[in-house]
Image (cartoon, coloured by chain):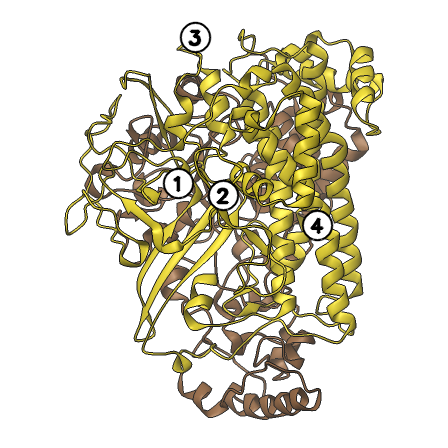
């Protein structure tokens, strides 16, 4: 097959050199690289042929697929037409049935060891894997063959990274992550519910640029996306340090953008770059939307980070001067007074002492 | 959310209700457009066929059906060269191995080219307009601002950390953009494509019973009578009578599903009494075929008064039409008139595709209406977003049970919950693809997908694009599979719906 460089492919589609460089700069920024790297990324992309990729869906909700459709740097159109040659993706590919399965097997056969396998969803192992079959084959069987022959496997979303919702207690189908299902393969975990597509495209471009995967932590997650806690970069951090906490949904502090720690925010325990890159071109992210972080990118958050609306018991280095309880009582009393003064109906009359007991 | 609110008797504030309407509304508009262009159009549109089009004639065609500005000959020439570059590269990616050139493709090359151009435009458009949901739901996909009792997104015209005048302006701009594309691109394309496939008004009818639980409450979440899209049931294609929905009449069979009920598989169970005891008894993988005389699906078989029901945009539009919904009736009648067919054409594959488009248009028209309601409430000083009276489990009764309905883009969704000692004692969901993709029940009655495929002509059994047309018209959940059966009940081939 004739291979094409990214830039020539882009120029055929009427993308200018200037726009291309803009994209490379954006990539460098997502990867937390100095701006000079944009040129290096551009040079690498110009030379590289479009790599082959296949996308597998197992125990999933297609949330990561939907997330992929929201890609901006590059856009989904650029991804599927220019950056990678995505030969198989159940949801968006035109082919179906036997023809679709042929596309998948063609890549495994003809590009062995050279393609990206992108996996969405957990893989059930119990009872021989009967709980997820596609065309009569188990997810375990397909993943073993497709991921086992790939250059690298990208586990997108928390289900393929850790097992996610399907593996939450009591894990009826024996759902596991790709790494557990197919031991020994090279996996990059890109968790999140769903994954943030900008981290996925940045990982691919990093590989195309430098010929290596971005630095990974002990859980196979890229440092650039999971190296810092939500709490470290949170826009509400100043309110945390100042002891200004939301106590009820819609209270004065909530409307002023105070810290959501008391409402159960798991930001201090969650490692993700949400506060930096946000969602949908920087439009918002959960804390900005007034809701605490549920640590959706953390391993087994459904069991280990719940209840989602109870505050974390102990946060290392918590508080600048006082404990949350002491600060909280004062603030809540002030907030309650504020509520009464403005005669806003419907506010509940939570007892602070009760709240403290339940932590 | 609604199931728990129903169980605990919680009424949510107006702001929360309106924000939920807006989130669901933009979800319909964006999701339906993605479905039409990216998940369904290629069953009708031959991408490779677009290479033969004359860009000048394509421009004339586009301008004859819409005043959408991107319609010049040079624009379509540019799109065509993109397609050519892709085909020439030999790396077709997501377009590999499809049924291009199949005799069932009937569009002239110019219509193919126009549709491909809009396929690409819609990809960019959807990413932008869904930001309405990001602003109100904090992220997309998977909005995170829903709370039992309301929403977590604060409302305050005097704060930079809450929905304010700037947010209203942001949403207003995007909702205009959403409506414009639907009115000037999606609907004209739908009518143009449909006019070449009118025979599909005669295929894919299905079970003929339709259930809509209704959506978009006009005043109070607990008041089911006042929904913008009404709740109701159409039986046996009779549009003259809309029956009320009684949730206690919904029962699920597992006769042909890989589950077992303690008291045997012959009887159906209401979701409050529902059981999920899975027991696989199918062939050992890898396998080629499933035996429909035995158990053959992970889906249960929901029935209403023992009848299979179709859910989705067609069900919602038919129930609205039958209930005399003014705007829905206007748009349905105008579409039928333009295509030169009567209401009976709605009970078909083509009807399902058309109903989705009609719903998208009328929903896009409502976005500014709901937005105005939100702004009006803010103006009056109503800043409530949450009813916290039952937030603490200590306020709950020892036992409670409830149910909640929601119309997801692909159809009616019901959740049933049983709460005991502040914990979930039972939770059952009956989801749209369970209704539509349901296997047979104890009486052997087929579900909507299976019934709709009967009588579908297939030109080439190895390339059954005709089957895809009908199954895709339901907008099946991608986690599901179907089993193709001929009129004699013999299974021919199993297709993964992609």
Badge 2 is on which residue?
B411
The residue at 19%/49% (across/down) is: B261
Badge 4 is on which residue?
B366
Badge 3 is on which residue?
B460
Q: Are marks 1 and 4 on the same chain?
A: yes
Dot 1: element: helix
On the image, the x and y values in percent for residue B17 come to 61, 63
On the image, the x and y values in percent for residue A17 come to 79, 29
Disc 4: which chain? B
Q: Earlier in the sequence, mark 2 or mark 3?
A: 2
Badge 1 is on which residue?
B435
Left or right, residue B138 beside residue B382: left
Q: Earlier in the sequence, mark 3 or mark 4?
A: 4
Colour assignment, chain A: brown
Disc 3: which chain? B
B325 versus B45 height, above or below: below
- Tag 2–tag 1 contact (CB < 8 Å): yes
Q: Earlier in the sequence, mark 3 or mark 1?
A: 1
Colour assignment, chain B: yellow
Can residue A73 be seen in this snapshot? no
Using the image as rendered, state which of residue B192 and residue A289 is in the foreground: B192
Q: Nearer the viewer, mark 3 or mark 4?
A: 4
Disc 1: which chain? B
Distance, label 2 to label 3, CA atoms, is 31 Å
Disc 2: which chain? B
Q: Quadrant of residue B353?
A: top right
All told, the count of numbered labels is: 4
Distance, label 1 to label 4, CA atoms, is 28 Å
Left or right, residue B302 beside residue B473: left
A238 versus B424 height, above or below: below
């Amino acid at each position: 097959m004739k291979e094409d460089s990214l830039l020539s492919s882009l120029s055929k589609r009427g993308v200018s050199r200037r726009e291309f460089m803009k994209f490379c700069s954006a990539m460098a920024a997502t990867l937390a690289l100095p701006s000079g790297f944009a040129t290096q990324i551009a040079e690498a992309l110009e030379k590289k042929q479009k790599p082959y990729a296949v996308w597998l869906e197992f125990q999933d909700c297609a949330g990561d697929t939907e997330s992929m459709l929201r890609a901006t740097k590059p856009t989904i159109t650029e991804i599927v037409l220019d950056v990678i040659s995505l030969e198989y993706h159940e949801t968006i590919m035109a082919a179906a049935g036997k023809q679709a399965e042929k596309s998948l097997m063609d890549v495994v056969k003809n590009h062995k060891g050279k393609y990206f396998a992108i996996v969405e969803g957990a893989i059930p192992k119990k009872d021989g894997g009967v709980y997820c079959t596609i065309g009569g084959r188990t997810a375990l069987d397909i993943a073993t063959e497709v991921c086992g022959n790939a250059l690298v496997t990208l586990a997108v979303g928390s289900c393929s990274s850790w097992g996610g919702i399907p593996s939450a207690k009591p894990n009826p189908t024996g759902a596991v992550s790709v790494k557990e299902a197919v031991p020994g393969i090279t996996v990059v975990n890109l968790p999140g519910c769903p994954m943030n597509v900008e981290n996925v495209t940045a990982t691919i471009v990093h590989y195309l640029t430098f010929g290596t995967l971005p630095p990974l932590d002990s859980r196979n997650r890229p440092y650039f996306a999971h190296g810092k806690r939500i709490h470290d970069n949170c826009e509400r951090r100043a309110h945390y340090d100042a002891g200004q906490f939301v106590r009820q949904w819609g209270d004065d502090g909530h409307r002023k953008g105070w810290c959501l720690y008391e409402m159960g925010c798991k930001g201090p325990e969650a490692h993700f770059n949400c506060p930096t890159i946000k969602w949908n071109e920087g439009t918002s992210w959960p804390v900005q939307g007034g809701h605490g972080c549920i640590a959706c990118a953390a391993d087994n958050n459904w069991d280990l980070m719940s209840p989602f609306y109870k505050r974390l018991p102990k946060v290392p280095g918590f508080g600048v001067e006082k404990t949350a309880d002491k600060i909280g009582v004062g603030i809540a009393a002030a907030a309650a007074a504020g509520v009464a003064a403005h005669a806003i109906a419907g506010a509940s009359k939570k007892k602070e002492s009760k709240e403290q007991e339940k932590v | 959310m609604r199931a728990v609110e129903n169980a605990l008797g919680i009424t949510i504030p107006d702001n929360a209700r309106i924000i939920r309407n807006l989130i669901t509304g933009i979800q319909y508009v964006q999701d339906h457009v993605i479905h039409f262009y990216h998940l369904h159009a290629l069953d009708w549109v031959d991408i490779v066929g677009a290479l033969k089009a004359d860009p000048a004639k394509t421009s004339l065609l586009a301008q004859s059906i819409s005043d959408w500005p991107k319609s010049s000959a040079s624009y379509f020439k540019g799109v065509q060269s993109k397609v050519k570059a892709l085909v020439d590269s030999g790396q077709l990616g997501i377009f590999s191995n499809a049924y291009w050139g199949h005799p069932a493709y009937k569009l002239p090359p110019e219509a193919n080219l126009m549709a491909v151009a809009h396929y690409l435009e819609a990809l960019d458009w959807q990413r932008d307009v869904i930001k309405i949901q990001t602003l109100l739901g904090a992220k997309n996909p998977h909005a995170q601002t829903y709370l039992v009792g309301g929403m977590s997104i604060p409302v305050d015209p005097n704060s930079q950390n809450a929905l304010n005048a700037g947010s209203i302006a942001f949403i207003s701009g995007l909702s205009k953009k959403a409506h414009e594309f639907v009115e000037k691109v999606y609907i004209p394309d739908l009518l143009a494509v449909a006019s070449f496939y009118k025979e599909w008004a005669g295929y894919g009818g299905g079970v003929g019973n339709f259930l809509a639980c209704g959506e978009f409450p006009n005043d109070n979440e607990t008041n089911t009578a006042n929904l913008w899209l009404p709740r109701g049931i159409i039986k046996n294609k009779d549009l003259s009578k809309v029956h009320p929905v009684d949730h206690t009449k919904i029962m699920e069979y597992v006769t042909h599903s890989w589950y077992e009920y303690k008291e045997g598989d012959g009887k159906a169970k209401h979701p409050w009494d529902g059981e999920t005891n899975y027991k696989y008894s199918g062939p050992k993988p890898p396998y080629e075929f499933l035996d429909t005389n035995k158990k053959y699906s992970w889906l249960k078989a929901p029935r209403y008064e023992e009848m299979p029901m179709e859910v989705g945009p067609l069900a919602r539009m038919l129930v609205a039409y039958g209930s005399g919904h003014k705007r829905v009736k206007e748009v349905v009648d105008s579409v039928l008139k333009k295509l030169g067919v009567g209401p009976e054409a709605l009970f078909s594959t083509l009807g399902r595709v058309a109903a989705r488009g009609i719903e998208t248009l009328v929903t896009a028209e409502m976005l500014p209406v709901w937005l105005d309601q939100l702004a009006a409430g803010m103006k009056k000083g109503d800043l409530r977003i949450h009813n916290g009276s039952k937030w603490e489990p200590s306020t709950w009764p020892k036992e409670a049970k409830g149910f909640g309905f929601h119309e997801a883009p692909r159809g009616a969704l019901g959740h049933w919950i049983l709460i005991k000692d502040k914990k979930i004692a039972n939770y059952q969901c009956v989801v749209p693809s369970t209704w539509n993709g349901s296997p047979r029940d104890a009486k052997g009655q087929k579900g909507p997908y299976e019934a709709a495929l009967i009588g579908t002509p297939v030109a080439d059994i190895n390339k059954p694009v005709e089957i895809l047309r009908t199954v895709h018209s339901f907008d099946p959940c991608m986690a599901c599979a179907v089993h193709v059966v001929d009129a004699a009940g013999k299974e021919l081939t199993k297709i993964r719906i992609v």
